[in-house]
Image (spheres, helix red, strand yellow):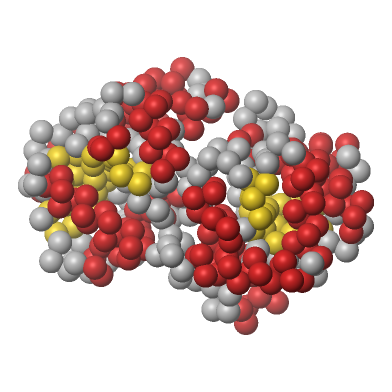
Amino acid sequence: MHVALNGWFWDQPFTGSGQYTRQLVIALRRLDPSLMLTLIVPATMQPEGVPDGVQVVPVRLAFGGNPAKVWFEQRGYPAAVARTGAEIAHIPYWGPPLSSPKAKLIATIHDVVPLAIPAYQGGLGARLYTSLVTAASRGVAHIITDSEFSKEEIVARIGGIAPEFVTSIPLACVPEMHPRMGAERDPATRERYALPDDYALYLGGFDVRKNLLALIAAWTFVKAAVGDDYRLVMAGKPPAKWGTARFPDLPAEVKKLELDDVIRFIGPVAEADKPGVYRMARASIFPTLYEGFGLGPLESMACGTPVVAADATSIPELVGDAGYLVDPLDSRLMAGAIVGTLIKDELHNRLANEGLARATNFNWMKTAAATLEIYKRVANL
């Protein structure tokens, strides 16, 4: 069997789509060396880290700027697939072409946020793109997604897709997310980001669905209970502009609530430093309102750090009973869960141990094996 993957995000391994593409290709190559894999990339890319035996096919772009991605997805990639003779064309993100007559199409749709939340619909160009990929999704042979929640959302919000043509295959995190591996570098990581001795962590984006206004409100109750014994470290790349429909002004809210002394924004964290930042935290907080999978809680559990997370969307599937799940709209309850996890050693240790055990259920070889079964099923249609 020959599978040709869209490699647009290959050189962006720190994005969700980039990490998924890389880890899936690496695991597929290890799982079944007889499987022919071709990675189709824009000619402007010099792909690094491609496993031996994976063919790389560059495609010259007809445009520059934003139109280049659409042209690559709709014209360049399908044409390259036809030239390779691949039976399966896998687009590992929400960007399938309208047609690929020489191969059967499989798309991985991690979530349908633009269809679910108005703030993410963007301007005219973004809405047109969402309409394009929504229409294209109805014509693929099969859709892979990350959770049963996302499967339900895809069927309900895209429409015209029967549930049996959508398969949920959970993601995994990289092996470096570990309670001990690389821990000797943690002191240098603490110094690099000026991390306090005792802290709770939020690591992720700052967009509105992450529900961080509720977390900041919860910290007023946490501060009343523990004072400045524990700080809240908020890590991630800040938006170009705070105070929009998509990015609420979180620093202003911290200042308004007089939490400047206990809440710190440390900016983006390098991938190599993330395990240490997780490991050294007393707890990780994920109050998100909408998530297709939720890699952050899994990474935290894999590093041995207890998780307090939203009892919403896909998060319960991922965390199960191994984390403290709370109503994301109730800041007082959220604060109680955070305080308990910070100061009650028995609760903290139980969640840490159960989280570690839970995280072992997710690995890239399992993800690759389930994906390979979809390839085989579609190839035999």
Q: Is residue 300 above or below residue 160?
A: below
Q: Quadrant of the C terminus?
A: top left
Q: Residue at x 36, y 21 (%)?
A: 131
Q: Is residue 289 left or right of residue 131?
A: right
Q: Is residue 102 left or right of residue 314?
A: left
Quadrant of res 19? bottom left
Quadrant of res 238? top right
Q: Quadrant of the N terminus?
A: bottom left
Q: Is residue 378 above or below residue 157?
A: below
Q: Position of residue 156 (x, y in %)?
A: 39, 27
Q: Residue at x 83, y 61 (%)?
A: 230
Q: Is residue 316 above or below residue 290?
A: below
Q: Position of residue 174 (x, y in %)?
A: 45, 65
Quadrant of res 8? top left
Whether residue 222 appears in this view of the structure is yes
Q: Residue at x 65, y 26 (%)?
A: 245
Q: Position of residue 22 (x, y in %)?
A: 35, 58
Count of numbered tags: 0
